[in-house]
Image: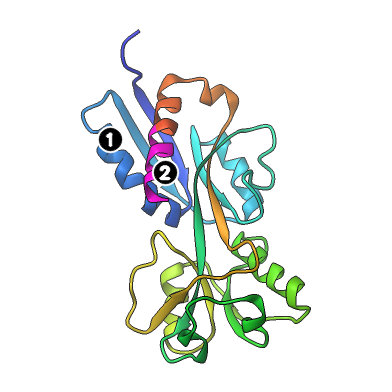
Amino acid sequence: MGQPGGTVSIGTLPSAGEALLPGLVERLRGSPITIEVQDFDLAEEGFAARTLDHDLVIAHSAAGDVPSGAEGLVARVLAHEPLDVALPIGHLLAAKAELSPEDLVGTSWIAVPQGFPFDSVLLAIEAVTGSPLHRRLRLIDNRLVESFVAVGEGLALLPRFTTRPHPGTVLRPLRGVNARRALVALARPDHYARRAVRAVVGHLEQIGRELA
């Protein structure tokens, strides 16, 4: 039957794309498969609808392995990525090797919009401690979030695989709640039936294993 070929269109969450897609490009170089890529950041339930426009959508969820709204789609977990707490370098909690929900009582946060996966971690912290957290700002871009953390505007959750060292912040793991996200490839069954799409997912699964 020969090698699978053709164009595979991919829609992706930017931070997940940064972690996964450069390796995919390297693996596909010289093969009959080419990719087209569009990036977007959405509330968790919004990713499923984008499978109407793309062969694959790389989504994420902090609540489970299948993003909300993706029931009925093909879903393949590519990696589980820890979400670390970013703190200003001089913060009292920066002296701890890891953090618990109780450590975070009374803290302020640079949060994500409601419905975005990272917010479920803050909700879990509140459920464990019985104490509300203050959302100082709600932002999407991780680089902008980190810049506000560095100047002391609040703490934040940042993905471990693509958060680069920053002179004004430190990262600490969070224990006691589910502080990780699933990076998931979503596809409509008719799109997933294409050999090229399945081949791309296989490459992405291998890249995800290497990241983890």
Q: Amino acid at mark 2?
A: Arg
148 above or below 114?
below
Element at label 2? helix
Picture residue at 44% right of the left edge, 52% below the top: 16
Between tags 1 and 2, which lies in front?
A: 2
Q: Position of residue 202 (x, y in %)?
A: 42, 31
Q: 170 or 151, which is in the foreground?
A: 170
Q: Quadrant of the N terminus?
A: top left
- Label annotation for residue 209: 2
User: Which residue extends farthest right?
Assistant: 130
21 sits left or right of 103 in the view: left
Residue 193 in view (yes/no): yes
Q: Position of residue 128 (x, y in %)?
A: 74, 72
Q: 39 or 65, which is in the foreground?
A: 65
Q: Which quadrant holds residue 197?
A: top left
For label 1, the residue is 27
Residue 135 in view (yes/no): no
- Crowd tier of the residue under label 2, counting other residues whose Cα lies within 10 Å: few below 14, some 14–19, many 20 or above: few
Q: Amino acid at mark 1?
A: Arg
Q: How is the image coloured?
A: rainbow
Q: Is residue 63 magenta?
A: no
Q: Is residue 208 magenta?
A: yes
Extent of the magenta region: 203-212
